Amino acid sequence: MRITIKVGSNVLTRPDGTLDFTRMSSIVDQIAQLRHEGHEVLLVSSGAVACGRSELKHIQEDLDSVDQRQLFSSVGQAKLMNRYFELFREYGISVGQVLTMKENFNDSPHRSNQENCLRVMLKNGVLPIINENDTVSITELMFTDNDELSGLITQMTHSDMLILLSNIDGIYTGNPSDPDARLIPTVNPNADLTAYISPQQSSAGRGGMQSKASVACSLAASGTPVIIANGKRSDILLRLIHQPDTTPCTRFIC
Ligand code: GLU
Protein backbone atom coordinates (compact mmCIF):
# COMPACT_ATOMS: atom_id res chain seq x y z
CA MET A 1 0.00 0.00 0.00
CA ARG A 2 0.94 3.63 -0.44
CA ILE A 3 0.13 5.31 2.89
CA THR A 4 0.13 9.00 3.74
CA ILE A 5 0.72 9.52 7.46
CA LYS A 6 0.14 12.87 9.13
CA VAL A 7 1.69 13.49 12.53
CA GLY A 8 0.31 16.43 14.52
CA SER A 9 2.29 18.85 16.68
CA ASN A 10 0.64 17.45 19.81
CA VAL A 11 2.12 14.02 19.07
CA LEU A 12 5.65 15.34 18.64
CA THR A 13 5.78 17.72 21.58
CA ARG A 14 5.75 17.22 25.33
CA PRO A 15 3.33 19.22 27.49
CA ASP A 16 6.06 21.85 28.07
CA GLY A 17 6.32 22.38 24.28
CA THR A 18 9.71 20.73 23.76
CA LEU A 19 10.25 18.15 21.03
CA ASP A 20 9.50 14.61 22.24
CA PHE A 21 12.49 12.73 20.76
CA THR A 22 11.34 9.39 22.17
CA ARG A 23 7.97 9.63 20.43
CA MET A 24 9.56 10.83 17.23
CA SER A 25 11.99 7.97 17.27
CA SER A 26 9.18 5.47 17.82
CA ILE A 27 7.25 6.86 14.85
CA VAL A 28 10.36 6.60 12.71
CA ASP A 29 10.89 2.96 13.85
CA GLN A 30 7.34 2.11 12.81
CA ILE A 31 7.57 3.82 9.43
CA ALA A 32 10.85 2.02 8.78
CA GLN A 33 9.10 -1.27 9.58
CA LEU A 34 6.19 -0.45 7.24
CA ARG A 35 8.65 0.31 4.45
CA HIS A 36 10.46 -2.93 5.20
CA GLU A 37 7.15 -4.74 4.72
CA GLY A 38 6.85 -3.16 1.29
CA HIS A 39 4.59 -0.20 1.96
CA GLU A 40 5.35 3.19 0.48
CA VAL A 41 5.03 6.04 2.98
CA LEU A 42 4.66 9.81 2.71
CA LEU A 43 4.99 11.65 6.00
CA VAL A 44 3.23 14.96 6.61
CA SER A 45 4.81 16.26 9.79
CA SER A 46 3.71 19.28 11.79
CA GLY A 47 5.71 20.53 14.73
CA ALA A 48 7.89 23.22 13.16
CA VAL A 49 6.26 26.16 14.93
CA ALA A 50 6.00 24.34 18.29
CA CYS A 51 9.60 23.19 18.02
CA GLY A 52 10.90 26.68 17.12
CA ARG A 53 8.90 28.25 19.92
CA SER A 54 10.52 26.01 22.51
CA GLU A 55 13.96 26.59 20.95
CA LEU A 56 13.60 30.40 21.06
CA LYS A 57 12.17 30.68 24.56
CA HIS A 58 14.60 33.50 25.32
CA ILE A 59 13.11 35.81 22.69
CA GLN A 60 11.42 38.58 24.63
CA GLU A 61 10.39 40.86 21.77
CA ASP A 62 6.70 41.48 21.22
CA LEU A 63 6.01 39.57 18.04
CA ASP A 64 2.68 39.49 16.27
CA SER A 65 1.26 36.13 15.23
CA VAL A 66 2.67 36.30 11.68
CA ASP A 67 6.17 37.19 12.90
CA GLN A 68 6.00 34.39 15.46
CA ARG A 69 4.95 31.79 12.92
CA GLN A 70 7.66 32.88 10.45
CA LEU A 71 10.41 33.05 13.05
CA PHE A 72 9.53 29.87 14.94
CA SER A 73 8.91 27.77 11.83
CA SER A 74 12.22 28.86 10.25
CA VAL A 75 14.14 27.52 13.24
CA GLY A 76 11.82 24.66 14.17
CA GLN A 77 11.61 23.16 10.68
CA ALA A 78 15.40 22.90 10.51
CA LYS A 79 15.54 21.19 13.89
CA LEU A 80 12.70 18.82 13.04
CA MET A 81 14.22 17.76 9.71
CA ASN A 82 17.65 17.38 11.22
CA ARG A 83 16.23 14.91 13.73
CA TYR A 84 14.19 12.98 11.13
CA PHE A 85 17.21 12.84 8.84
CA GLU A 86 19.40 11.28 11.52
CA LEU A 87 16.75 8.86 12.80
CA PHE A 88 15.85 7.54 9.33
CA ARG A 89 19.51 7.32 8.37
CA GLU A 90 19.97 4.63 11.00
CA TYR A 91 17.65 2.51 8.86
CA GLY A 92 19.39 3.47 5.62
CA ILE A 93 16.33 5.47 4.57
CA SER A 94 16.91 8.74 2.72
CA VAL A 95 14.42 11.45 3.49
CA GLY A 96 13.67 14.64 1.58
CA GLN A 97 12.02 17.82 2.76
CA VAL A 98 9.02 19.13 0.84
CA LEU A 99 7.78 22.53 1.98
CA THR A 100 4.69 23.51 0.11
CA MET A 101 1.91 26.05 -0.28
CA LYS A 102 -1.72 26.03 -1.28
CA GLU A 103 -1.05 27.32 -4.79
CA ASN A 104 0.92 24.14 -5.52
CA PHE A 105 -2.37 22.23 -5.44
CA ASN A 106 -4.37 24.57 -7.68
CA ASP A 107 -4.72 24.00 -11.37
CA SER A 108 -1.43 25.58 -12.39
CA PRO A 109 2.08 24.63 -13.51
CA HIS A 110 2.96 24.58 -9.79
CA ARG A 111 0.70 21.60 -9.38
CA SER A 112 2.50 19.49 -11.94
CA ASN A 113 5.86 20.50 -10.45
CA GLN A 114 4.64 19.39 -7.05
CA GLU A 115 3.30 16.14 -8.45
CA ASN A 116 6.52 15.45 -10.28
CA CYS A 117 8.63 16.13 -7.20
CA LEU A 118 6.70 13.61 -5.10
CA ARG A 119 6.68 11.08 -7.92
CA VAL A 120 10.44 11.22 -8.46
CA MET A 121 11.10 10.96 -4.72
CA LEU A 122 8.88 7.89 -4.31
CA LYS A 123 10.27 6.29 -7.45
CA ASN A 124 13.77 6.60 -6.03
CA GLY A 125 12.89 5.34 -2.57
CA VAL A 126 13.24 8.75 -0.89
CA LEU A 127 10.73 9.29 1.88
CA PRO A 128 9.01 12.67 1.45
CA ILE A 129 8.59 14.61 4.71
CA ILE A 130 6.09 17.31 3.93
CA ASN A 131 5.05 20.46 5.76
CA GLU A 132 3.52 23.75 4.86
CA ASN A 133 6.09 26.43 4.09
CA ASP A 134 5.11 28.40 7.16
CA THR A 135 7.83 31.00 6.59
CA VAL A 136 6.07 32.45 3.55
CA SER A 137 2.54 31.09 3.42
CA ILE A 138 0.48 33.73 5.15
CA THR A 139 -3.28 34.42 5.43
CA GLU A 140 -5.20 33.43 2.29
CA LEU A 141 -2.23 31.49 0.94
CA MET A 142 -2.33 29.17 3.96
CA PHE A 143 -3.82 25.69 4.26
CA THR A 144 -6.46 25.51 6.97
CA ASP A 145 -3.98 23.21 8.73
CA ASN A 146 -1.88 20.14 8.00
CA ASP A 147 -4.99 17.95 8.02
CA GLU A 148 -6.09 19.72 4.85
CA LEU A 149 -2.57 19.47 3.42
CA SER A 150 -2.38 15.73 4.12
CA GLY A 151 -5.74 15.20 2.39
CA LEU A 152 -4.44 17.01 -0.70
CA ILE A 153 -1.22 14.98 -0.66
CA THR A 154 -3.25 11.76 -0.35
CA GLN A 155 -5.27 12.71 -3.42
CA MET A 156 -2.33 13.96 -5.44
CA THR A 157 -0.27 10.81 -4.86
CA HIS A 158 -3.24 8.43 -5.12
CA SER A 159 -2.38 7.03 -1.70
CA ASP A 160 -4.38 3.97 -0.66
CA MET A 161 -4.94 5.30 2.85
CA LEU A 162 -4.49 8.37 5.04
CA ILE A 163 -3.65 8.00 8.73
CA LEU A 164 -4.10 11.13 10.87
CA LEU A 165 -2.18 10.84 14.14
CA SER A 166 -3.25 13.12 16.93
CA ASN A 167 -3.18 12.86 20.74
CA ILE A 168 -6.63 11.31 20.96
CA ASP A 169 -7.88 7.84 19.90
CA GLY A 170 -10.48 9.16 17.47
CA ILE A 171 -13.99 10.58 17.58
CA TYR A 172 -16.00 9.98 20.75
CA THR A 173 -19.73 10.10 21.36
CA GLY A 174 -19.11 12.84 23.95
CA ASN A 175 -16.30 14.61 25.72
CA PRO A 176 -13.44 12.04 25.77
CA SER A 177 -12.82 12.76 29.45
CA ASP A 178 -16.40 11.74 30.25
CA PRO A 179 -16.40 8.04 31.34
CA ASP A 180 -19.65 7.45 29.42
CA ALA A 181 -18.19 8.68 26.13
CA ARG A 182 -17.49 5.84 23.66
CA LEU A 183 -14.97 5.81 20.84
CA ILE A 184 -16.73 5.55 17.46
CA PRO A 185 -14.88 2.77 15.62
CA THR A 186 -16.25 3.30 12.11
CA VAL A 187 -17.84 6.22 10.34
CA ASN A 188 -19.68 6.29 7.08
CA PRO A 189 -18.60 9.29 4.98
CA ASN A 190 -22.17 10.60 4.87
CA ALA A 191 -22.64 10.45 8.65
CA ASP A 192 -23.53 13.65 10.46
CA LEU A 193 -20.90 14.05 13.18
CA THR A 194 -21.76 17.57 14.31
CA ALA A 195 -23.19 16.34 17.62
CA TYR A 196 -19.91 14.59 18.48
CA ILE A 197 -17.26 17.10 17.52
CA SER A 198 -16.29 20.25 19.37
CA PRO A 199 -14.71 23.07 17.33
CA GLN A 200 -11.76 23.17 19.76
CA GLN A 201 -8.33 23.47 18.13
CA SER A 202 -5.12 21.66 18.93
CA SER A 203 -3.11 23.25 21.75
CA ALA A 204 0.21 22.92 19.90
CA GLY A 205 -0.83 23.24 16.24
CA ARG A 206 -3.69 24.64 14.14
CA GLY A 207 -5.75 21.50 13.49
CA GLY A 208 -8.64 20.04 15.45
CA MET A 209 -11.13 17.19 15.24
CA GLN A 210 -13.51 19.20 13.07
CA SER A 211 -11.01 19.62 10.28
CA LYS A 212 -9.84 16.00 10.58
CA ALA A 213 -13.40 14.76 10.24
CA SER A 214 -14.10 16.99 7.28
CA VAL A 215 -10.96 15.88 5.43
CA ALA A 216 -11.70 12.25 6.33
CA CYS A 217 -15.33 12.37 5.16
CA SER A 218 -14.47 13.91 1.84
CA LEU A 219 -11.63 11.48 1.11
CA ALA A 220 -13.69 8.45 2.17
CA ALA A 221 -16.58 9.67 0.00
CA SER A 222 -14.23 9.63 -2.98
CA GLY A 223 -12.96 6.11 -2.18
CA THR A 224 -9.92 6.50 0.11
CA PRO A 225 -10.16 5.19 3.68
CA VAL A 226 -8.94 7.45 6.48
CA ILE A 227 -8.02 6.55 10.05
CA ILE A 228 -7.83 8.94 12.99
CA ALA A 229 -5.72 7.47 15.79
CA ASN A 230 -3.59 8.34 18.79
CA GLY A 231 0.06 8.83 17.86
CA LYS A 232 1.04 8.66 21.51
CA ARG A 233 0.04 4.99 21.76
CA SER A 234 2.94 2.64 21.37
CA ASP A 235 3.29 0.92 18.00
CA ILE A 236 0.08 2.55 16.83
CA LEU A 237 0.95 2.53 13.11
CA LEU A 238 1.91 -1.14 13.11
CA ARG A 239 -1.16 -2.08 15.13
CA LEU A 240 -3.48 -0.17 12.80
CA ILE A 241 -2.15 -2.15 9.86
CA HIS A 242 -1.65 -5.57 11.51
CA GLN A 243 -4.38 -5.67 14.16
CA PRO A 244 -7.06 -3.48 12.63
CA ASP A 245 -9.93 -4.95 14.62
CA THR A 246 -8.49 -4.53 18.10
CA THR A 247 -6.69 -1.19 17.81
CA PRO A 248 -8.54 1.88 19.09
CA CYS A 249 -9.20 4.40 16.32
CA THR A 250 -11.94 5.88 14.17
CA ARG A 251 -12.01 4.55 10.61
CA PHE A 252 -13.77 6.39 7.84
CA ILE A 253 -14.89 3.66 5.51
CA CYS A 254 -15.73 4.06 1.85
N1 GLU B 1 2.74 23.71 9.74
C1 GLU B 1 2.59 23.88 11.16
C2 GLU B 1 3.88 23.46 11.87
O1 GLU B 1 4.67 22.72 11.36
C3 GLU B 1 1.47 23.04 11.74
C4 GLU B 1 0.09 23.33 11.20
C5 GLU B 1 -0.97 22.49 11.91
O2 GLU B 1 -0.95 22.43 13.15
O3 GLU B 1 -1.80 21.87 11.24
O4 GLU B 1 4.08 23.86 12.99
Image: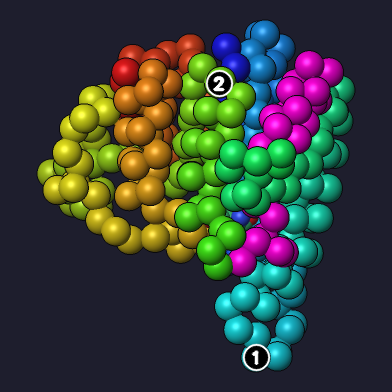
Q: Residues within 10 Å of mark 1 (few under 14, many from 20)?
A: few
Instruction: Give, as a three-letter code, the residue at label 1.
Output: Asp
**Of 23 and 223, which appears nearest the observer?**
223
Q: Nearer the viewer, mark 1 or mark 2?
A: 2
Magenta-span inclusion, residue 69: no
Q: Which residue is mark 1?
A: 62
Highlighted magenta segment, given as a residue range: 111-138
- 177 sits left or right of 93 in the view: left
Q: Secondary structure at mark 2?
A: loop
- The answer for how far apart the CA atoms under marks 1 and 2 are is 42 Å
Q: Which residue is mark 2?
A: 159
**Of 26 and 193, which appears nearest the observer?**
193
Is the residue indicated by label 1 positioned so its CB lies within 8 Å of ligand 1? no
Q: Establish if 35 lies above or below 229.
A: above
Write down which quadrant ligand 1 falls in: bottom right
Instruction: Give, as a three-letter code, the residue at label 2.
Output: Ser
In this orientation, does residue 131 appear? no
Relative image position of residue 142 (x, y in whole percent): 56, 58
Relative image position of residue 113 (x, y in whole percent): 75, 35
**What colour scheme has been applied to the protein in the rendered image?**
rainbow
Q: Earlier in the sequence, mark 1 or mark 2?
A: 1
Q: Quadrant of the C terminus?
A: top left
Relative image position of residue 162 (x, y in whole percent): 49, 28
Residue pictured at 73% horizontal, 84% vertical: 59
